[in-house]
Image: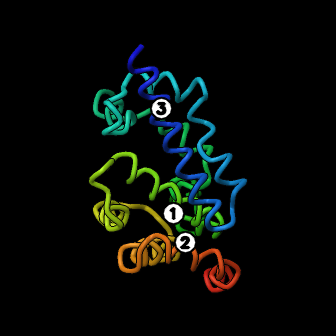
Amino acid sequence: MNSFFGHLNTVLAHKRLVFYHARKIGIPFQGFMHDMSKFSPMEFPAGVKYYAGGKRSPNEIQREKFGYSQAWLHHKGVNKHHFEYWTDYNPKEKCVMPVKMPYKYVLEMLCDRLAASKVYQGKNYTDSHPLEYFQNGKAKRVIHPDTSDAIESLLLMIKDKGEKYTLDYIKHNRKELEKKYNN
């Protein structure tokens, strides 16, 4: 029963933070709808079963045990704020390749990374944690270069100028940022 409520509280804390950040940048509906699949029969039971006190993702533990995480495969397959969602077969190259994410999902991914870092780091969180996490996996990541550059530049801004500055900047410049990203 502890893992049920522990996992539920972790998911709700994460969702609250995503919603908070999404409201700050002007995408409240995306923030509200964020990660609803975590309550699905494909994801929630695995989250409870592999709950690790809110310090590690249950998906990591399921992946260690089975070589893959069925919950993660479902999650990334239905949530467009994950760059892993944005891959498709390229007939010219004859392989699966990354596709450039729409900017509104890049912004949701930013909110997701901020929230996840805060939840998993707890009182040890600093504005550099989301960037560090992103950079740690960069060499192995299959992500469109434009998408990678866009999220990394926002995470760098958080590290260098702080969360409040960055979220205000995004809110006031979202249309211009999207236009620049789409060119």
Q: Quadrant of residue 54?
A: top left
Residue 133 position in % (x across, y down):
32, 60
| Label 1–label 3 contact, CB within 8 A | no
- Crowd around label 3: few <14 · some 14–19 · many ≥20 (10 Å): few
Front one among 13 and 148: 13
Residue 80 position in % (x across, y down):
62, 53
Residue 15 against residue 47 in the figure, above or below: below
**172 left or right of 60 in image:** right
Label number found at residue 167: 2
Return the disc, 1 or 2, that comes first in the chain's sequence. Answer: 1
In the rendered structure, which amino acid carries the disc numbered 1?
Answer: Leu
Q: Which of the two marks, 1 or 3, is nearer to us in this view?
A: 3
In the rendered structure, which amino acid carries the disc numbered 3?
Answer: Asn
Return the disc, 2 or 3, that comes first in the chain's sequence. Answer: 3
Which residue bears the numbered disc 1?
110
Label number found at residue 140: none
In the rendered structure, which amino acid carries the disc numbered 2?
Answer: Leu
Question: What element does badge 3 sit on?
Answer: helix
**77 left or right of 130 in image:** right
Inter-mark Cα distance, 1 to 3: 21 Å
Tell me what residue is drawn at x 66 percent, y 80 percent: 172
Tell me what residue is drawn at x 57 percent, y 80 percent: 169
Colour scheme: rainbow
Residue 158 against residue 54 in the figure, above or below: below
| Label 1–label 2 contact, CB within 8 A | no
**136 left or right of 95 in image:** left
Residue 39 against residue 21 in the figure, above or below: above
Return the disc, 1 or 3, that comes first in the chain's sequence. Answer: 3
